[in-house]
């Protein structure tokens, strides 16, 4: 196992903590608007070994109070759970980013107390999920199971959606609001086009659209906030 990126310090990725962010490779989705497509498609080169990462964490004891693990999809491979254990055993709380496609590994991570905060991508309404993740035959069932698991209160969590004009509309958010009705926290983040995005030409919604969509979600979720909108 290799590490494909390391942000040595962040105040943004793990709410309420000074953390580092660890990037893993590989994903089972092919979202046309992905910012980390080189990780998702496993085209990136590793930056360090797991042993080097753990040595870094040992040196940062007392300076960092959390580790965010992202990708790619961190639950894509079973052996990544071993990395979470190694981080946990060093006393670091873990924030996990996931797309929800591996509920059995998410359950194992929660059962073992490996995850103190989980950020799960909610890509779109169920009827538009396959289109949004770039997989025509995508089965949304595992994602539904992961949503239920987080909403059961097993750990602190958030759902989040990257809004893209070509994939999202008012109907999308009405359906998502009903889907996660009663959820704790939801963030709506505005798509930003970058060189790494697979499908160039996609566009962000307007700030007015973003605010209107957030209002649709508010009756369903305890805390709703925008990201990337001034």
Image (cartoon, rainbow, N blue to C red):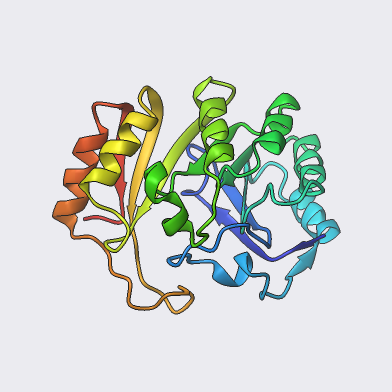
Give the side of residue 122 with respect to residue 221, left or right. Answer: right
Return the x and y of residue 67 as percentages of the image width and height: 64, 45
Return the x and y of residue 118 as percentages of the image width and height: 56, 37
Of residues 47 and 216, which is closer to you in this image? 216
Of residues 216 and 24, which is closer to you in this image? 216
Farthest left residue in view: 208
Return the x and y of residue 56 as percentages of the image width and height: 76, 56
- Answer above or below: position of 143 versus 133: above
On-image quarter of the C terminus: bottom left
Give the side of residue 77 with respect to residue 115, left or right. Answer: right
Give the side of residue 90 with respect to residue 98, left or right. Answer: right
Taking the spot 57% from the left edge, 31% from the top edge, the residue there is 145
Taking the spot 47% from the left edge, 54% from the top edge, the residue there is 130
Query: Which quadrant of the figure has residue 204?
Result: bottom left
Return the x and y of residue 93 as percentages of the image width and height: 66, 35
Please count the marks in the image: 0
Give the side of residue 130 with respect to residue 102, left or right. Answer: left
Taking the spot 57% from the left edge, 42% from the top edge, the residue there is 100
On-image quarter of the N terminus: bottom right
Farthest front residue in view: 137
Of residues 32 and 161, which is closer to you in this image? 32
């Amino acid at each position: 196992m290799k590490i494909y990126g390391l942000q040595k310090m962040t105040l943004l990725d793990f709410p309420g903590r000074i953390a580092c962010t660890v990037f893993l490779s590989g994903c089972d989705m092919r979202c046309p608007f992905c910012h980390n497509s080189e990780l998702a498609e496993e085209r990136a080169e590793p930056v360090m070994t797991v042993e080097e990462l753990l040595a870094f964490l040992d040196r940062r004891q007392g300076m960092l109070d959390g580790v965010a693990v992202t990708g790619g999809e961190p639950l894509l491979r079973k052996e990544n759970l071993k990395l979470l254990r190694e981080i946990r055993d060093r006393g670091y709380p873990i924030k996990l980013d996931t797309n929800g496609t591996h509920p059995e590994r998410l359950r194992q991570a929660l059962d073992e107390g490996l995850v103190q905060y989980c950020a799960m991508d909610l890509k779109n309404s169920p009827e538009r999920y396959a289109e949004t993740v770039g997989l025509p035959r995508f089965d949304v069932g595992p994602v539904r199971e992961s949503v239920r698991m987080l909403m059961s209160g097993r750990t602190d969590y958030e759902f989040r959606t990257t809004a893209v004009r070509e994939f999202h509309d008012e109907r999308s958010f009405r359906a998502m609001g009903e889907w996660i009705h009663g959820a704790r926290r939801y963030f709506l983040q505005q798509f930003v086009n970058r060189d790494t995005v697979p499908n160039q030409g996609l566009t962000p919604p307007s700030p007015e659209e973003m605010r209107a969509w957030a209002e649709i979600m508010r009756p369903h979720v305890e805390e709703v906030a925008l990201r990337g909108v001034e």
